[in-house]
Amino acid sequence: MKYLILRRIVQISILILFSFSVFDFILKGNLSSSILFSTIPLSDPFAFLQLVFASLQMDVMALSGALVIFFFYAIFAGRAFCAWVCPINIITDLAHFFRMKLKVNQIKTINVNKNLRYYIMTLSLVLSLVLSFPVFEEFSYIGIIQRGIIFGGVSWIFIALTIFCIDAFLSPRFTCSHFCPLGAFWALVSHFSLLKVRYDLQKCTKCYKCIQICPEKQVLWMIGKEEQDVKSGECIRCGKCIDVCGDDALGFNILKIRRENEK
């Protein structure tokens, strides 16, 4: 449970930092655009791309902020934004918990192609260019819910409940694993990131608890078959598989750097 607790601490801490002006010297703004320590610009690279496509112009400050975030995830953290930062993760994790408790899996639910999110990502960029406004950013449920939590209001609650119900009763992990274009964007750019989940075949007793709990089950195809790191960019580095593994067969690994130090 340690990674679940750590993720919740990080997610809630980020919301608190954004919510109270007393913390503006640390973090000010929102997930789309913010300032760290009153100096370092931070911008959502996918939102930045939409703005560039929509306006055919490029703001230097926004570009520098987008590059900071892009290289942090692309080089080091991978798709960790989805599990450690995005507030939607709290909702979908809760929906999954209810789904398991109510045994909704016993009921036939809607199956959706996982590539749908990549089509939506591409469509968002194309429409941003055609319509001259950032399409996904304009209607982003991520931004609506985050701003709703930060600034108050009630409309975000309806959207949160809708996402919860879809994930709990219609299609498991639909929002993050099948629909979200931002998740698709991070999956594409994080394939070569250094932070990986290590798998030790020799320690594995093939209980498959890790696969049962993983929100992106396809990334654990090697379990019980061959020893290697989880290389897929679709891994969100949530640590759920590590938390449930009683064999110490799974763990986070700084790819190559750690291996060289162990030699």
Image: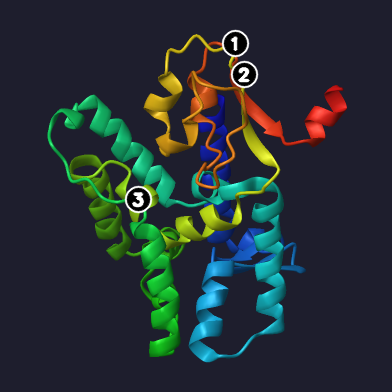
Q: In this view, does 263 lie above or below 38?
A: above
- Label number found at residue 245: none
Q: Which of 144 and 104 is in front in this view?
A: 104
Q: Distance between the residues labelled 3 and 2?
A: 28 Å
Given residues 203 and 138, the one toward you in this image is 203
Q: How crowded is mark 1: few (under 14 residues within 10 Å), some or many (20 or more)?
A: few
Q: Position of residue 112 (x, y in %)?
A: 26, 50
Q: Mark 3 or mark 2: which comes first in sequence?
A: 3
Callout 2: helix, strand or loop? loop
Asked whether the beta carbons under mark 2 and mark 1 sit within 8 Å of each other, the answer is yes
Residue of label 2: 200
At 52% from the left and 72% from the top, the residue drawn is 47
Tell me the amino acid under the disc marked 1. Answer: Lys
The residue positioned 57% from the left and 75% from the top of the image is 48
**Element under disc 3:** loop
Residue 138, position as x, y percentages in the image? 40, 76
Residue that numbered label 1 is attached to? 203
Query: At which x and y percent is residue 240?
Result: 49, 29
Q: Which kind of residue does numbered mark 2 sit on?
A: Asp
